[in-house]
Amino acid sequence: MEYTVQKLARLAGISARTLRYYDEIGILKPARMNSSGYRIYGQAEVNMLQQILFYKELGISLESIKKIVTAPSFNGVEALKEHRAQLLEKRKQLDLLIANVEKTMALTEGRMSMTDKEKFEGFKQKLIDDNEIKYGKEIRNKYGADTVNKSNAKLKNMTQEEYEEATRLANEVNVTLAEAFKTGDPAGAIAQKAADLHKQWLTYFWSEYSKEAHAGLAQMYMDDERFKAYYDEKQPGTAEFLRDAIHVYTGFKK
């Protein structure tokens, strides 16, 4: 069966403008143009759109999705299996959060007691699961499963105060990094302060700190489009600047 832009948009629950944009950026081209100049999509394009929307649901950027689905090694069947596994993980996250809300309601109504640690279990587990879905494969390949598992265990055992301090540090890193970027000097005092704050933030999640691992993570911020997009969202070039600042800080400057 074939679809026009309007028909496929209605079928998929997205806007026609979105489909046209996907065509413009080359992530989803129509099968052909008809004699009237309208885009026509076939079954292959419908299947590809499904894959794209699955990846979007998992929070992956369009730039990264394009690289995934246009890679010669892309396998639609294997991708669906991966989507299923990741969606099951998301369902587990939601179940945990729902259970957490129900416990909190019961606590508020005086039907049960709940420790402060239990109040934040769902949120910490969601953070772990989100990281696993988005970056787990790359991080495990780079640092090893044992290191990642220890890091996850450390996060799960954080106290409320530690979790709040880690969150505060993350915000301070971003604010200081933005100020440092304006100077244009990754070796400058403000940039080095940002790198030191970044180290302090890491120690809340890493079981062990090393300058080499810190420098390697900074390089990953440049090599992985998802990390790069996060830091470059407000100011392009920030990921590279942070990488350079951390390399100076750790002594791994090239």
Image (tube, rainbow, N blue to C red):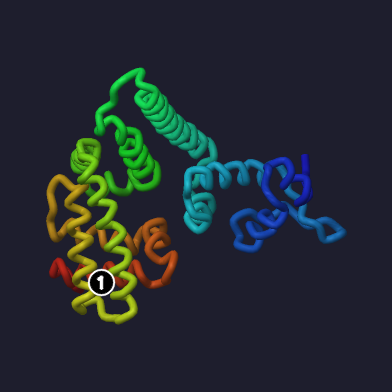
Give the residue type that dot 1 points to. Asp
Residue named by callout 1: 244
> Dividing the image into 4 quarters, which one contains the C terminus?
bottom left
Provide residue 195's location: percent of width, then percent of height.
21, 66
Picture layout, residue 208 above or below residue 146: below
Q: Which one is nearer the viewer's eye here, 36 or 21?
A: 21
Q: Is residue 92 visible?
A: no
Provide residue 107's location: percent of width, then percent of height.
35, 25
Q: Quadrant of residue 246?
A: bottom left
Q: Which one is nearer the viewer's eye here, 248 or 34?
A: 248
> Dividing the image into 4 quarters, which one contains the N terminus?
top right
Provide residue 193's location: percent of width, then percent of height.
20, 70
The residue shown at (26%, 80%) is: 185
Q: Quadrant of residue 158?
A: top left
Q: Quadrant of residue 2?
A: top right
The residue shown at (15%, 59%) is: 212
The residue shown at (35%, 21%) is: 110
